[in-house]
Image: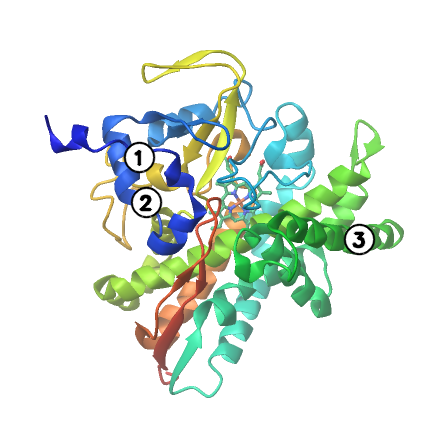
Amino acid sequence: MSVATEIPLPGAEILDPRRFVSDGYPHADWARLRREDPVHWCARQKGEPFWAITKHEDIVRISRQPERFLNAPRLLMSADQGLGEQDLPIRMLLNMDPPEHHQFRSLISKRFTPRALLGIRERVDGIANEILDSAMEGGGEAEMDFVGAVSALLPIWVIAEMLGVPREDWELLFHWTNRTIGAADPEYREEGKSAQETVEAARTSLFHYFNDMTEDRRKNPRDDLVSILSNAKIDGEPLPPFELLSYYLLLVVAGNETTRNATSGGLLALIENPDQLEKVRANPALVKPMVEEVLRWTSPVIHFCRTPTDDVEIRGQQVRAGDRLVLFYPSANRDEEVFEAPDEFRVDRSPNRHIAFGIGEHFCLGAHVARLELEVIFRHMVLRMEDLELAGPIERLRSSVVGGIKHMPIRYRLRAAS
Ligand code: HEM
């Protein structure tokens, strides 16, 4: 009997948020599942059982059939009762199915195309510069918590700008989104409140805020996302209030923690692979492919679920209608059938068919915003920071939805201006 068959296959513990804190992503477990049981039944003592889908090809095929594999019944698996990763009770793109999903998505999708984003490129560049300037004040040799000083700020500032939120309220948005997505982590929990209460309190504050803004934009429309959505109609009717507020919440939350963690995880990858950092320094044209490799490497979204409408066979497994399928994006992005040397971080990887943004009907609406932010921030950092190293241990977020780094102390020296 081989060693592989003696050790039981990984089970539901691959979703345990506590393990993400201590060990990061369970890449060895995912690799074993891809090899030995890529559509793997995970029974659980507490909570619903699920199928772990770990191959690139399967996730692509499932995601491209939105009528057969639904989002609405359940988007996330709660990793453990009471840990606050229950589905957010909101009605938004991610838990809508066709044809409703398309109606809602098309209201603003034109604002997120690469062409439309050309218009905000300069502004994003300005924001990134401002963040780095204030983080690196003083110059010379310095230390900072990279997450708090840089990577956490850029995504929220950019989406706040796109929504039309005034500058003085960006901090508020930042506070609410941290609590909405990170409530399973005690650091982000409101004192004296449970994870669920923390999420609900943050959501209520955010709803109140955007309710006021909606009223204002109906009277005084401007060139921003809140104005478009406040005045949008579906079948001749304005969006119902709950759907409208949920839309804002999704936009604020979806781009925040994800891009933050691609930025922090990307910098960590460069620190751990100095030869790759040197390669980009020598050839800044590599920043673009490097951003794609950072997305593949960090894969900030750990999982989303799909629910089949009918019984279906996947890789020989009999999946029943209503079963839970958990799509593990970071596993797909290390699939050895798709990527050469998947466990190597290569800034010039080509081709790079990663699915960090998902694929198909629900392909990340903000993918080009995230790409722009990452490109801009890495271009600045690669050119300005030298002698980069970790200045202490990193701390990871307790979540099985978004793989996150909460704190990452770094030491660096600033390059003299040329
Ligand atoms: C590195 C950063 C990001 C990553 C890794 C990421 C990842 C994802 C993934 C995996 C999905 C689901 C795709 C699927 O089910 O097929 C998604 C959907 C979505 N993302 Fe992102 N995202 C990022 C940044 C952003 C940004 C910056 C925004 C907004 C400005 C955003 C807004 C959305 C929205 C609205 C959806 C729902 C789309 C739909 O259901 O039609 N994301 N994202």
Farthest residue to the right: give it: 219
| Quarter-of-image position of residue 26 | top left
Local packing at callout 2 (Cα closer than 10 Å; few below 14, some 14-19, many 20+) is some
| Residue 10's disc number | 1
**Pointer 3 residue:** 208
Residue sitting nearer the eye, 408 or 220: 408
Local packing at callout 1 (Cα closer than 10 Å; few below 14, some 14-19, many 20+) is some
Look at the picture and state if 256 lies above or below 356.
below
Tell me the amino acid under the disc marked 1: Pro
**What residue is drawn where x is 30% and y is 63%?**
270
- In the displayed structure, does residue 145 sit left or right of residue 229? left
**Pointer 2 residue:** 26
> Which of pointers 3 and 2 lies earlier in the amino acid sequence?
2
Q: How many marks?
A: 3
Tell me the amino acid under the disc marked 3: His
Cα gap from disc 1 to disc 2, whole angstroms? 10 Å
